[in-house]
Amino acid sequence: MCGIIGYVGKRNAVPVLLYGLQRLEYRGYDSAGIAVIDKNGDKIIVEKQVGKIKDLQEHLWNRKIEGHTALGHTRWATHGPPTIENAHPHTSQRETISIVHNGIIENYLELKEELIKKGYRFRSETDTEVVAHLFEELYTGDLLETALKVAKKLEGAYAIGVISTYEPDKIVGIKKGSPLIVGFGKDENFIASDIPAVLEYTKDFIVLEDGEIAVVTKDNVEVYNLEGKKLEKKPLHVTWDISVAEKAGYKHFMQKEIHEQPRTIGDTITGFSSSKDEKLFEAIKDADRLYIIACGTSYHAGLVGKFWIEKFARIPVEVDYASEYRYRDRIINNRTVVMGISQSGETADTRFALLDAKKEGAKTIGLVNVVGSSLSRETDYVMYTYCGPEIGVAATKTFTAQLVTLLLFALEAGLKKGTVSKPEYKKLYDELLHIPSKVESILNNEEGIKEIAHKYMNAQDFLFLGRNINYPIALEGALKLKEISYIHAEGYPAGEMKHGPIALIDDKLPVVCVIPQDKYYEKMFSNLQEVKARKGKVVSVATEGDTKVKELSDDVIYIPPASDVLYPILTVVPLQLLSYHIATLLGKDVDQPRNLAKTVTVE
Ligand code: G6P
């Protein structure tokens, strides 16, 4: 999704913007641009390029642009294709105002018509350009006052950055629906879509809430609500180092993040235990139903969570895609709990579905990674994963951390309800503490997994099969592969294969069977035999020492033994590596796959 950065301060803004834009690349984009108020403050220089930040950098080479107030943007196309005209920043007719925007202005056609009638000419197909012209049309002599007027006219979700030659030492940021933070420096301040974009320069931030406007100069930051009332905002200090947003010697962020899992799983276990919110567990004690809503990988974590919550806390759980949940006639009463799972905490579908459920009387819980994100502030209770920033578009470390949190949540809820005994809890908790070293041992076999990837990299399709709690892992394995390698892949519950997907099996189809030695092993083994009988190529993820599976499979990836319920945290890891290596062997851009965005802030 689009990324915003803004700088006002003593140094030349251009390198700061380019650095920030690189940090925003992971969000997904197809073009980028900057708008800089020139040193004399009388003109806005706008430069844009289609493609990557390095294309913009090359374009700026030798152009010698200098200024101290500026905006930058990475665009993920919604209205109009990726072209230079459609790229942001957009500038008002008299070129006095420049705008960057993340989100969608839903009433832009209406506003556009009005502006055209008033003589404004549009240069792009975007919804954003109306905002630039609207600022010029409504300018009162004060940018904040104008921003209040503009915000009243806009419908939809947006984060907007504004600069103007009328007030050349100022940036105005408006937030409604899409994320926007303000970073505090010394003799300089920033706005950005997220923290990593400016983490090089500061660790102190304000996270803007919906309906807030920030007025930022080099020495001062003021925040107002949409009525123009000045607000007191408490800054947030982050403790992460910039190194968490660097590749640390790995080829890609995705590979680095896969390898971080022993640490992030460990941190999440500790984090959960040390910051348990007792009120949350009191609140869910009487729950008669729990809905889990999420998108993408987070949805798969929810599907695994259902098994744990139903088993340990004995609460009926329904898991739904947020975009579907939002528009169905759900049943909510005062004993309904709705949990939204979201790495970013900004996914529009998940946020809005949760807000609707909250309005209807449900208690809401957020399970998020990004501290201070919208979802974390909008829900009644919040649980965090402790992963630091995840930059690779395909979620990996946050998935396993979501699993750990859901398991601990289920156990804790079960303990409070009396459906889990203390020794049972302790036994699983102690075993959980060994999961990081088990994940480490899977990662040590990366070369072996890469060889398997090499063998199957040219397949046209893949089928992933699993049963029970490992069925969502089959779904996640298929999602990872299609996201980054563009190979068609389907995940299926193995028992359901005979009702359809079995027709796909021939000697060219790789079938990945998730078959740990758990309660469903024999059933899964029968499914594996069914695949083999039809000459499918079987790649198994099996428990160490399982020679029976080895004999029947074309390839095996072993994982260490564990209790049945803990297997998903292990079985997913080889599938992440398998997808990663297939995609890199095919030469794909794994950190920024085509058409995908890390944080999807539009519906
Ligand atoms: C996008 C990303 C996925 C992610 C999904 C949900 O589609 O490409 O990797 O799983 O959003 O994101 P969230 O931040 O809500 O977990």
Image (cartoon, helix red, strand yellow):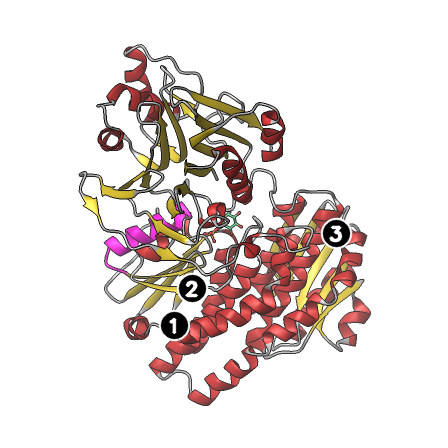
Q: Which residue is mark 3?
A: 509
Residue drawn at (53%, 22%) of the image: 84
Q: Is residue 535 visible?
A: no
Compare marks 1 and 2 and give the one earlier in the sequence: 1
Residue drawn at (40%, 42%) of the image: 190
Is there a contact, CB below 8 Å, between mark 1 and mark 3? no
Check disc 3 and report its element: helix, strand or loop: loop
Q: Quadrant of residue 336?
A: bottom left
Residue 292, placed above or below residue 442: above
Q: Which residue is mark 2?
A: 384
Residue drawn at (56%, 38%) of the image: 595
Camera-side residue of 499 and 93: 93
Q: Can you tell which mark lies on residue 275?
A: 1
In magenta stretch: residue 174: no
Camera-side residue of 135 and 381: 135
Left or right: where 558 falls relative to 64: right
Q: Which residues lie in the magenta part?
A: 347-362
User: Mark 3 packing: few (<14 Cα in 10 Å), some, or many (20+)?
Assistant: some
